[in-house]
Image (spheres, helix red, strand yellow):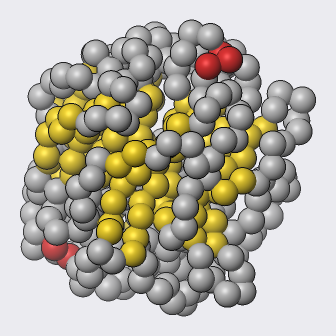
Amino acid sequence: MLIKRGLVIITLLITAGVAVTPRKASLEPCARIVGDEPITHTSVTPYLGGRGPGDQIGTTAYEYQANGSFGQRIMVDDYGQAHINWMWQDYPGQTMRYCAWNARFTDGSYYGETQACPSYTGYVQLDVTRDANPDNQRTVIVYHEFGAPNYLSWLDIDGGNVWGTWPNNPTTINQNYYVWPYVCAASNGNIVMATGDYNADALHLFVTTDEGASWTAITDIDSCACLSQFLRASHNSDKVVFVYTSFITDSIAGGQLDNDVYYMLSTDGGATWGSRINITNYQPSDTVRAYCNVNAIFDDSDNLHIVWAGRKVDAGGYYEASKIFHWDEVSGNITVVNSPSTYYSEPGGWWIATATSPSPGAWRMPADQPQLVCDANDGT
């Protein structure tokens, strides 16, 4: 498995300068983890200004919010209300963790920070059901239970539209050590969950047609040393996409650094799936490999878009230089999204963590964790 540390605020700016000597990162494979290990913080990314203060939705003492892909912890329903969750931890004791939930109403007011699951749990994700009547659009949360002997993935659904009735009726796929869950709610009422695996380099895909009362195992994906799973449901059809990375070689860090980006598509809400599609097909001569940071969305024309963070490959095998890449199914082209040239001089267009710039942290890259949203005005 992999360990990633970083602030909840994920925007990362590189200090201006011309020195581009990359840091030398540890390439030892991360020990397998189940989420309850203590975290030792060695560095903090500084706040560099330039952003608004936003609204405080709650508190936490735990900035280690996700392993692998950042995922989704905010979703807007058809009323324009924001459903939000995050992993809460107490301070200064730091003895408890759970899924915290909040909602922002259309008038700008908030429901209030709410405990949404039993302790000791965390590593949370969410979506919102796609009922035609917005009154019935409810928060769907998933979370990860840790505490021997149980390491399980759980799902819960609010009793109504921003009712905040938590816990409501938590259900589990009941597979021990299938943890780090990600979730999406399809338009036909199905709910899809993807998990990692403590005991194998594998990801697992499940679907429920009855809101978690029963689960169907869809497939197991091997050769996945990273917790890269990400799910997204279309808001225009019954399409669901499962995106992840699968290693090309296990010669560096147990396969955690050299990956291609794959996706699988369902057109019936996750009941059946198409074949695995490799959209990168990186070759030995390429200067890029994917890590774990993937995200996807369907635009208003129901076309699929995928983004990911790619690390620079060089003779030293370092991953302290990166770019953000975008692919769409219409063009089939891969394009570079970011351009760090406004921050420092680097002819190749890479974001680079240098000997004098802030470190991105363990198992992080200078530019990573991209997110996709659809513009409410024009559907792009």
Q: Position of residue 287 (x, y in %)?
A: 24, 58
Q: Residue at x 14, y 65 (%)?
A: 200
User: Residue 324, can we see it?
Assistant: no
Q: Residue at x 16, y 62 (%)?
A: 201
Where residue 191 sits, quadrant-wise, is: top left
Q: Nearer the viewer, residue 36 or 53?
A: 36
The quarter of the image holding the N terminus is: bottom left
On screen, residue 304 versus residue 29, left or right, reads: right
Q: Position of residue 372 (x, y in %)?
A: 52, 36
Q: Position of residue 321 (x, y in %)?
A: 41, 67
Q: Residue at x 39, y 75 (%)?
A: 147
Q: Residue at x 50, y 63 (%)?
A: 122
Q: Is residue 304 above or below residue 371?
A: above
Q: Nearer the viewer, residue 112 or 232?
A: 112
Q: Nearer the viewer, residue 117 or 65?
A: 117
The quarter of the image holding the C terminus is: top right
User: Residue 136, can we see it?
Assistant: yes
Q: Is residue 116 above or below residue 361?
A: above
Q: Nearer the viewer, residue 125 or 283?
A: 125
On screen, residue 302 versus residue 202, left or right, reads: right
Q: How many marks?
A: 0
Q: Position of residue 85 (x, y in %)?
A: 62, 50
